[in-house]
């Protein structure tokens, strides 16, 4: 008998790649999808006919629903990936974000505890929890969350440790730095840049508007990161881990690289909120737009994944260039 996994957030970027990985490993994969008036399962539609792939309606903020699903599915492993995962949106919907990204893990932890299940739980933590703490951020770096999203994730992280210590439950925290892919949501900056560059190249869009071009991120590929999630869950003891590449680039550099793949050289002119990116003929293709700034900015994230490297043998297989090529080719 293969293992049974339950994935919340299965319709998102990571949920789709993790599903594929677990099915390849012989798991029965159950996922929670939210009821929506429009289709929200595009990322996993190709798995729909797989005999070991099953979707259930649910919402992580509904603890009764989570308890019922966990009691019915009896999973060996739960991956809690569900989240309102957009940092900027979390400033506009703080209470919902804290409910979905922070409080909701309690529904899962309590269900597993009350049902007495021998079930491992993975919580999708984030480099945003470090906020503007000095880089490189490692497992000793203090959390300095500076968005409702990050505050919620810090709470979930500590609840996991609390249940691990108090009830001896197998609670695993993955603190993952930014990871992208062709399945990335359209409003995250890498996908937005790739889509816009292609549309500008094809004459379908005139300009790309961005916020903070100086923001620096440690960008990896989601395929590498879901493999890391699974490896953390197989480790003999429940622990906290960091997955990152250690390589950093700014939003400006990422944009330059993407346009360069289309043979467009961007020249950056001006500073701060007046900065623009022009092609060699002087046409403005990129402009800074105040609306994409956040009330609080996280300026520089660079992770130190040494523990995962040494104890799991995990290391990223995609370079930043590989990632951009994969996103451009999609
Ligand atoms: P994503 O593409 O935004 O996917 C989020 C998933 O959560 C979607 O399936 C979404 O469903 C679901 N969801 C949202 N609210 C829910 C609710 N109340 N109940 C049930 N499902 C809900 O995010 P991702 O990039 O795959 O990230 C996966 C997890 O890792 C998230 O927790 C994120 O915060 C965390 N994380 C991501 C990164 C990264 O760089 N990607 C880095 C660190 C941590 P719909 O499809 O219906 O919206
Ligand atoms: N989205 C977006 N749109 N971001 C922009 C833009 C823009 O037009 N212009 C500049 N940025 C900057 C943001 O201010 C941020 O500093 C950086 O680009 C990356 O933004 P996002 O792609 O939205 O990702 P994020 O870093 O805020 O959050 C992602 O990574 C976290 C891990 O560090 C999300 O996936 C989170 O869920 C994840 O936890």
Image (cartoon, helix red, strand yellow):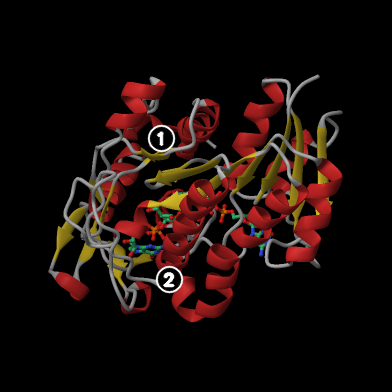
Q: Could you tell me which residue is drawn at 25 percent across and 57 percent down?
A: 142
Q: Quarter of the image containing the C terminus?
A: top right
Q: CA distance from mark 2 to mark 1?
A: 24 Å
- How many discs appear? 2
Q: Could you tell me which residue is drawn at 28 percent across and 54 percent down?
A: 251
Mark 2 neighbour density, 10 Å: few (under 14) some (14–19) many (20 or more): some
Q: Is residue 279 visible?
A: no
Nearer-the-camera pick, 163 or 127: 163
Report the mark closest to the observer, 2 or 1.
2
Q: On the image, which quarter does residue 47 sit in? A: top right
Query: Does the beta carbon of the residue at mark 2 sit less than 8 Å from ligand 2?
Result: yes
Which mark, by number, is residue 323?
Answer: 1
Secondary structure of the residue carrying numbered label 2? helix
The answer to whether residue 236 is left or right of residue 15 is: left
Residue 31 percent location from the top left of the image: 74, 45
Which mark, by number, is residue 88?
Answer: 2
Nearer-the-camera pick, 298 or 181: 298
Nearer-the-camera pick, 295 or 106: 106
Q: Quadrant of ligand 2?
A: bottom left
Q: On the image, which quarter does residue 111 sit in? A: bottom right
Mark 1 neighbour density, 10 Å: few (under 14) some (14–19) many (20 or more): many
Secondary structure of the residue carrying numbered label 1? helix
Examine the rendered structure and indicate whether residue 308 appears above or below residue 83. above
Q: Is residue 81 visible?
A: yes
Q: Residue furthest left?
A: 270
Residue 136 percent location from the top left of the image: 19, 45
Q: Earlier in the sequence, mark 2 or mark 1?
A: 2
């Amino acid at each position: 008998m293969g293992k049974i996994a339950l994935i919340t957030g299965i319709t998102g970027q990571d949920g789709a790649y993790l599903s594929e990985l677990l099915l390849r490993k012989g798991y029965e994969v159950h996922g929670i999808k939210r009821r929506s008036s429009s289709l929200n399962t595009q990322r996993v539609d190709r798995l729909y006919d797989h005999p070991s792939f099953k979707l259930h309606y649910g919402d992580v903020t509904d603890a009764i629903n989570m308890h019922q699903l966990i009691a019915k599915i009896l999973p060996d492993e739960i991956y809690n990936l569900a989240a309102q995962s957009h940092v900027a949106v979390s400033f506009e919907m703080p209470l919902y974000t804290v409910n979905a990204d922070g409080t909701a893990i309690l529904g899962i932890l309590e269900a597993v505890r009350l049902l007495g299940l021998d079930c491992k739980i993975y919580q999708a933590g984030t480099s945003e929890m470090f906020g503007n703490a000095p880089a490189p951020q490692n497992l000793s770096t203090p959390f300095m969350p500076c968005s409702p999203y990050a505050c919620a994730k810090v709470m979930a992280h500590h609840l996991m440790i609390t249940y691990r210590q108090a009830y001896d439950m197998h609670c695993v925290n993955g603190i993952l730095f930014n990871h992208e892919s062709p399945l990335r949501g359209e409003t995250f900056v890498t996908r937005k840049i790739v889509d816009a560059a292609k549309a500008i190249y094809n004459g379908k869009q005139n300009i790309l508007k961005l916020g903070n071009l100086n923001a620096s991120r440690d960008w990896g590929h989601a395929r590498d990161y879901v493999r890391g999630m699974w490896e953390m869950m197989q480790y003999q003891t429940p622990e906290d881990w960091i997955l990152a590449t250690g390589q950093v680039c700014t939003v400006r550099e990422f944009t330059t690289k993407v346009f360069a793949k289309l043979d467009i050289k961007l020249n950056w002119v001006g500073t701060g909120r007046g900065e623009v990116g022009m092609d060699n003929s002087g046409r403005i293709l990129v402009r800074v737009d105040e609306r994409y700034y956040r009330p609080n900015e996280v300026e520089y994230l660079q992770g130190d994944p040494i523990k995962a490297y040494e104890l799991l043998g995990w290391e990223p297989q995609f370079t930043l260039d590989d990632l951009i090529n994969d996103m451009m080719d999609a």
